[in-house]
Image: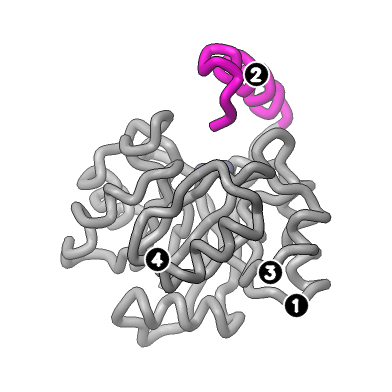
Protein backbone atom coordinates (compact mmCIF):
# COMPACT_ATOMS: atom_id res chain seq x y z
CA UNK A 1 0.00 0.00 0.00
CA UNK A 2 1.30 3.42 -1.00
CA UNK A 3 0.89 6.23 1.54
CA UNK A 4 1.53 9.97 1.11
CA UNK A 5 2.09 11.21 4.65
CA UNK A 6 2.48 14.94 4.03
CA UNK A 7 -0.37 16.75 2.22
CA UNK A 8 -1.76 20.26 2.69
CA UNK A 9 -5.41 21.23 2.19
CA UNK A 10 -6.93 24.69 1.96
CA UNK A 11 -7.07 24.72 5.76
CA UNK A 12 -3.33 25.49 5.47
CA UNK A 13 -2.99 29.19 4.70
CA UNK A 14 -0.93 28.32 1.61
CA UNK A 15 -2.82 25.17 0.47
CA UNK A 16 -5.15 25.12 -2.53
CA UNK A 17 -6.79 21.66 -2.33
CA UNK A 18 -10.24 21.14 -0.83
CA UNK A 19 -10.27 18.07 1.42
CA UNK A 20 -12.58 16.12 -0.97
CA UNK A 21 -10.29 16.97 -3.92
CA UNK A 22 -7.42 15.46 -1.93
CA UNK A 23 -9.30 12.18 -1.57
CA UNK A 24 -10.05 12.07 -5.33
CA UNK A 25 -6.41 12.89 -6.20
CA UNK A 26 -5.18 10.23 -3.77
CA UNK A 27 -7.39 7.59 -5.42
CA UNK A 28 -6.15 8.67 -8.88
CA UNK A 29 -2.54 8.45 -7.70
CA UNK A 30 -3.12 4.88 -6.49
CA UNK A 31 -2.69 5.72 -2.80
CA UNK A 32 -4.31 3.60 -0.11
CA UNK A 33 -3.43 5.90 2.78
CA UNK A 34 -2.75 9.60 3.32
CA UNK A 35 -2.23 12.11 6.07
CA UNK A 36 -3.41 15.70 5.73
CA UNK A 37 -0.78 17.64 7.66
CA UNK A 38 -1.96 21.23 7.47
CA UNK A 39 0.10 24.05 8.89
CA UNK A 40 -1.19 24.50 12.43
CA UNK A 41 -4.66 23.23 11.57
CA UNK A 42 -6.35 19.92 12.39
CA UNK A 43 -9.70 20.87 10.84
CA UNK A 44 -9.55 18.88 7.59
CA UNK A 45 -9.35 15.51 9.34
CA UNK A 46 -13.00 15.39 10.45
CA UNK A 47 -14.13 16.12 6.88
CA UNK A 48 -12.25 13.20 5.33
CA UNK A 49 -11.80 10.54 8.00
CA UNK A 50 -14.87 8.54 6.91
CA UNK A 51 -14.42 8.90 3.13
CA UNK A 52 -14.56 5.13 2.52
CA UNK A 53 -11.84 5.23 -0.17
CA UNK A 54 -8.46 5.89 1.44
CA UNK A 55 -7.23 5.49 5.00
CA UNK A 56 -6.54 8.85 6.64
CA UNK A 57 -4.02 9.12 9.48
CA UNK A 58 -4.87 12.14 11.67
CA UNK A 59 -1.99 14.60 11.32
CA UNK A 60 -0.75 18.16 11.51
CA UNK A 61 2.42 20.10 10.66
CA UNK A 62 3.16 22.29 13.65
CA UNK A 63 5.40 25.34 13.56
CA UNK A 64 7.64 25.07 16.60
CA UNK A 65 10.04 27.88 17.46
CA UNK A 66 12.84 26.03 15.68
CA UNK A 67 11.09 24.57 12.65
CA UNK A 68 8.34 22.33 11.35
CA UNK A 69 7.27 19.18 13.19
CA UNK A 70 4.88 16.54 11.85
CA UNK A 71 2.49 14.84 14.23
CA UNK A 72 0.63 11.63 13.39
CA UNK A 73 -2.10 9.85 15.32
CA UNK A 74 -3.09 12.90 17.37
CA UNK A 75 -6.59 13.38 18.77
CA UNK A 76 -6.50 17.18 18.98
CA UNK A 77 -4.91 20.33 17.65
CA UNK A 78 -1.29 21.07 18.66
CA UNK A 79 -0.48 24.73 19.41
CA UNK A 80 2.17 26.52 17.37
CA UNK A 81 5.08 28.60 18.63
CA UNK A 82 6.38 26.32 21.38
CA UNK A 83 9.92 25.00 21.76
CA UNK A 84 10.76 21.69 20.11
CA UNK A 85 10.57 19.68 23.33
CA UNK A 86 7.30 21.35 24.39
CA UNK A 87 5.82 20.58 20.97
CA UNK A 88 6.91 16.93 21.16
CA UNK A 89 5.43 16.67 24.68
CA UNK A 90 2.12 18.14 23.44
CA UNK A 91 2.04 15.64 20.57
CA UNK A 92 2.67 12.74 22.95
CA UNK A 93 -0.03 14.05 25.32
CA UNK A 94 -2.43 14.01 22.34
CA UNK A 95 -1.64 10.33 21.78
CA UNK A 96 0.50 10.97 18.71
CA UNK A 97 4.03 10.53 17.45
CA UNK A 98 6.39 13.36 16.45
CA UNK A 99 8.45 13.32 13.25
CA UNK A 100 11.05 15.92 12.28
CA UNK A 101 9.70 17.39 9.01
CA UNK A 102 12.24 17.93 6.17
CA UNK A 103 15.02 18.49 8.77
CA UNK A 104 17.61 19.85 6.33
CA UNK A 105 15.36 22.34 4.55
CA UNK A 106 16.62 25.87 4.78
CA UNK A 107 14.22 28.23 6.58
CA UNK A 108 11.54 25.86 7.86
CA UNK A 109 13.52 22.74 8.76
CA UNK A 110 14.73 22.03 12.31
CA UNK A 111 18.34 21.37 11.34
CA UNK A 112 20.38 18.39 12.43
CA UNK A 113 21.14 19.24 16.06
CA UNK A 114 17.49 19.98 16.95
CA UNK A 115 16.52 16.74 15.24
CA UNK A 116 19.12 14.60 16.98
CA UNK A 117 18.95 16.19 20.43
CA UNK A 118 15.18 15.98 20.89
CA UNK A 119 12.99 12.98 21.58
CA UNK A 120 11.58 12.51 18.07
CA UNK A 121 9.77 9.28 17.26
CA UNK A 122 10.83 9.44 13.62
CA UNK A 123 12.27 11.45 10.76
CA UNK A 124 10.67 12.54 7.50
CA UNK A 125 13.23 10.87 5.25
CA UNK A 126 11.87 12.10 1.94
CA UNK A 127 9.81 15.11 0.93
CA UNK A 128 9.05 15.89 -2.71
CA UNK A 129 9.53 19.61 -2.08
CA UNK A 130 13.01 19.16 -0.62
CA UNK A 131 16.18 18.93 -2.70
CA UNK A 132 17.64 15.52 -3.52
CA UNK A 133 20.64 16.22 -1.30
CA UNK A 134 18.55 17.16 1.74
CA UNK A 135 16.44 14.03 1.21
CA UNK A 136 19.60 11.89 1.05
CA UNK A 137 20.85 13.48 4.26
CA UNK A 138 17.50 12.95 6.04
CA UNK A 139 17.36 9.31 5.08
CA UNK A 140 20.97 8.80 6.15
CA UNK A 141 20.34 10.55 9.47
CA UNK A 142 17.31 8.36 10.22
CA UNK A 143 19.39 5.26 9.48
CA UNK A 144 22.29 6.51 11.58
CA UNK A 145 20.20 7.24 14.67
CA UNK A 146 17.87 4.29 14.10
CA UNK A 147 14.54 6.13 13.81
CA UNK A 148 11.43 5.16 11.82
CA UNK A 149 10.91 7.11 8.60
CA UNK A 150 8.03 8.83 6.88
CA UNK A 151 7.76 10.44 3.45
CA UNK A 152 5.31 12.60 1.56
CA UNK A 153 4.67 14.96 -1.30
CA UNK A 154 4.17 18.13 0.78
CA UNK A 155 1.60 18.84 -1.96
CA UNK A 156 -0.21 22.15 -1.75
CA UNK A 157 -2.22 21.40 -4.93
CA UNK A 158 -3.98 18.14 -5.95
CA UNK A 159 -1.65 17.45 -8.91
CA UNK A 160 1.36 16.85 -6.63
CA UNK A 161 -0.32 14.32 -4.36
CA UNK A 162 1.64 11.07 -4.52
CA UNK A 163 4.95 12.72 -5.53
CA UNK A 164 6.42 11.41 -2.26
CA UNK A 165 5.26 8.21 -0.59
CA UNK A 166 6.08 5.33 1.67
CA UNK A 167 5.34 1.77 0.67
CA UNK A 168 3.61 -0.07 3.53
CA UNK A 169 3.10 -3.83 3.92
CA UNK A 170 -0.16 -5.42 2.74
CA UNK A 171 -3.01 -6.10 5.13
CA UNK A 172 -3.43 -2.60 6.52
CA UNK A 173 -7.07 -1.79 7.26
CA UNK A 174 -6.99 1.17 9.65
CA UNK A 175 -4.87 4.25 10.27
CA UNK A 176 -3.69 2.62 13.48
CA UNK A 177 -2.36 -0.35 11.46
CA UNK A 178 -0.60 2.06 9.11
CA UNK A 179 1.01 4.01 11.93
CA UNK A 180 1.99 0.80 13.67
CA UNK A 181 3.79 -0.40 10.51
CA UNK A 182 5.55 2.97 10.18
CA UNK A 183 6.68 2.89 13.82
CA UNK A 184 7.99 -0.66 13.35
CA UNK A 185 10.23 0.62 10.57
CA UNK A 186 8.31 -1.12 7.77
CA UNK A 187 7.75 2.03 5.67
CA UNK A 188 9.90 2.23 2.52
CA UNK A 189 10.21 5.85 1.36
CA UNK A 190 10.47 7.05 -2.22
CA UNK A 191 10.05 10.52 -3.62
CA UNK A 192 10.85 12.96 -6.35
CA UNK A 193 12.85 16.05 -5.29
CA UNK A 194 12.75 19.79 -5.80
CA UNK A 195 14.95 21.02 -8.64
CA UNK A 196 17.55 23.78 -8.21
CA UNK A 197 15.53 26.44 -10.08
CA UNK A 198 12.47 25.97 -7.91
CA UNK A 199 14.67 25.98 -4.79
CA UNK A 200 15.78 29.51 -5.68
CA UNK A 201 12.15 30.53 -6.20
CA UNK A 202 11.26 28.94 -2.86
CA UNK A 203 13.92 31.03 -1.08
CA UNK A 204 12.72 34.28 -2.61
CA UNK A 205 9.08 33.40 -1.96
CA UNK A 206 9.77 32.43 1.68
CA UNK A 207 11.37 35.78 2.43
CA UNK A 208 8.78 37.90 0.60
CA UNK A 209 5.89 36.04 2.26
CA UNK A 210 7.60 36.36 5.63
CA UNK A 211 7.80 40.12 5.19
CA UNK A 212 4.16 40.17 4.05
CA UNK A 213 3.11 38.29 7.19
CA UNK A 214 4.83 40.89 9.37
CA UNK A 215 7.97 38.80 9.98
CA UNK A 216 5.99 35.87 11.32
CA UNK A 217 7.26 32.52 10.17
CA UNK A 218 4.80 30.03 8.68
ZN1 LIG B 1 7.14 22.15 6.39
ZN1 LIG C 1 4.34 20.82 4.65
Place of residue 67 in the rendered image (x, y in percent of width and height, measured from the top left): 65, 44
The residue singled out by tag 3 in the image is: 119
Nearest the viewer among 147 and 153 is 147
Q: Is residue 214 left or right of residue 161?
A: right
Question: Which range of residues does the magenta coloring cover?
Answer: 196-218
Residue 172 falls inside the magenta stretch = no
Q: Quadrant of ligand 1?
A: top right
Q: Is mark 3 within 8 Å of ligand 1?
A: no
* Residue 159, horizontal then vertical, whole percent: 39, 39
Identify which residue is drawn at 34% across, 41% down: 9
Separation of marks 3 and 1 at Cα, in angstroms? 12 Å
Look at the numbered discs 3 and 2 and tell me whether their residues touch, using CB distance below 8 Å.
Answer: no
The Cα atoms of the two marked residues, 3 and 4, are separated by 17 Å
Position of 153 with respect to 143 (left or right) is left
Q: Secondary structure at mark 4?
A: loop
**Labels 1 and 2: the sequence-earlier one:** 1
Amino acid sequence: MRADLHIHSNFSSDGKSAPDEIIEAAVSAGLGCISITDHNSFEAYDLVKDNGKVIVIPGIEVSSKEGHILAYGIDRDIPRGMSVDETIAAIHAAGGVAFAAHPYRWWSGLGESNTVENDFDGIEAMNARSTASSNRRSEALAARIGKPVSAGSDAHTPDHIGDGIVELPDGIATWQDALDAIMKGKAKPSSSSRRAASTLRYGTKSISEWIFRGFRRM
